[in-house]
Amino acid sequence: MSETRLRVERGGEITQLLVAIREDLAADSSVMLLLDATRSVLEPVAACGLDETLRTSARVPLGQGFAGTIAATAVPLVLDEVRSDNVVNPMLHRRGIRSLVGVPLLSDGMVIGVLHVGSLTPRTFTQDDIERLAARAEDLAVFVKARALVEEHVAALVLQRSLIPTVPPRIPGLDIAGRYLPAEGDLGGDWYDVFSLPGGRVGIVMGDVLGHGLGSAVIMGRVRSALRAYALIEESPARVLEMLDHKIDHFEAGMLATVVFAVASAPFDTFTVSSAGHWGPLLAGDGAVAQVDVPHDPLLGVEPATRRTEVQVSVEPGEVLCFFTDGMIEQRIDPDAAIDPERGIALVAENLSASLTAEANCISILAGAMPAERNRDDIALLVVRRDPDA
């Protein structure tokens, strides 16, 4: 069962709309099909009077048959006589549907699917029938889009929260706390990660897959898993990012991401850090806060042949590293001011202190550097403090 079908079947609103459409046109069946993620195949997602269409998961290639032609041309179509050679779904013919009229479902001028009704007796659908069905299709498309946006937002949020550790793992010698705050608008692909590695090492990641919505969240999950896998077999953070870049180039063509990856071993006095276009962390200690000087190599997905660099960062007992995504530093504290990342970094630095625990630092930073109203972009924040007694 497709994800789209599952979502539709869990709620009866669309089926109820199809019942009303069937009755309005005095028809015997009504079916809604939506284009899949590849926009190459129509999948039936709801039906009234022709339930076999759903049970058999009849898929219609774009441009083929009755529904496929409507989707490809974005033009209504009438079949006075349904035959096995002019429809792709054999259930239409087997169930005795004799005539069909269908119209495209449009959203922002783009075809997202097809709505059609059928008759068990021969019937010549009129121009008035087409116009009435098209009007119904407009309402249905608005409903489908609104519902899909909400469900995609929820799905992306659930996926991100399942992959981002609310409570980072306990690493003896380190005090770690993190936050992920979803945007009130469309979600992005921000994430952080903390994981143990062979030989007593620890890996720390802060990243951002460019783009928004469920697609970015899904890609983020794949990138996260790939980075973890490469980190198991390669000790160099720069080399791990090189391998990840090749993976993205081959399997995720067109995707871009920024990532900073750090690795350290107990007693965690030195962190090896490599950045693929991502902001370097802040380092707080002894009353001073400064940004770590990490070379910004190109984003992942730009040039897989890039030879990436890494630097050694010394961390004294009690000192704090703070990693963040651009959502943290590109918030509009003043609604009338322009976005200023340097000012955003300064705000984070003002609220970061080596005298505070990692958790207290997260609270301090979010209280002092977040806008009072809402965050328009995802925010990922990770604070790592070395044990003062180390």
Image (cartoon, helix red, strand yellow):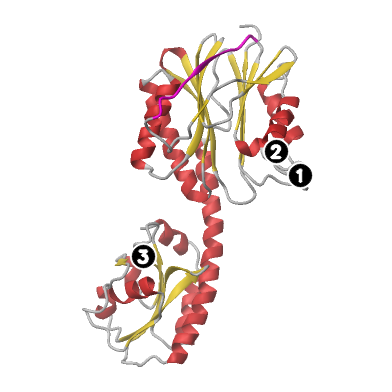
Please give the name of the residue rendered at 48% of the width and 81% of the height, measured from the top-left corner.
134
Where residue 200 sits: x, y (%)?
46, 13
Query: Circle 2 is placed at which residue position?
Result: 340
Residue located at (27% from left, 77% from top):
87
| Residue 354 against residue 50 in the figure, above or below | above
* Image coords of residue 373 (percent x, y): 75, 46
The residue at the far left in this view is 85
Q: Mark 3 points at which residue?
A: 43
Q: Quadrant of residue 36?
A: bottom left
- Residue placed most toward the observer, 55 or 159: 159
Of labels 1 and 3, earlier in sequence is: 3
SS under mark 2: loop
**Is 107 rendered above or below residue 214?**
below
Left or right: 74 as drawn, with respect to 378 = left
Q: Mark 1 points at which residue?
A: 337
Indicate which disc, 2 or 3, sits on the residue closer to the N terminus: 3
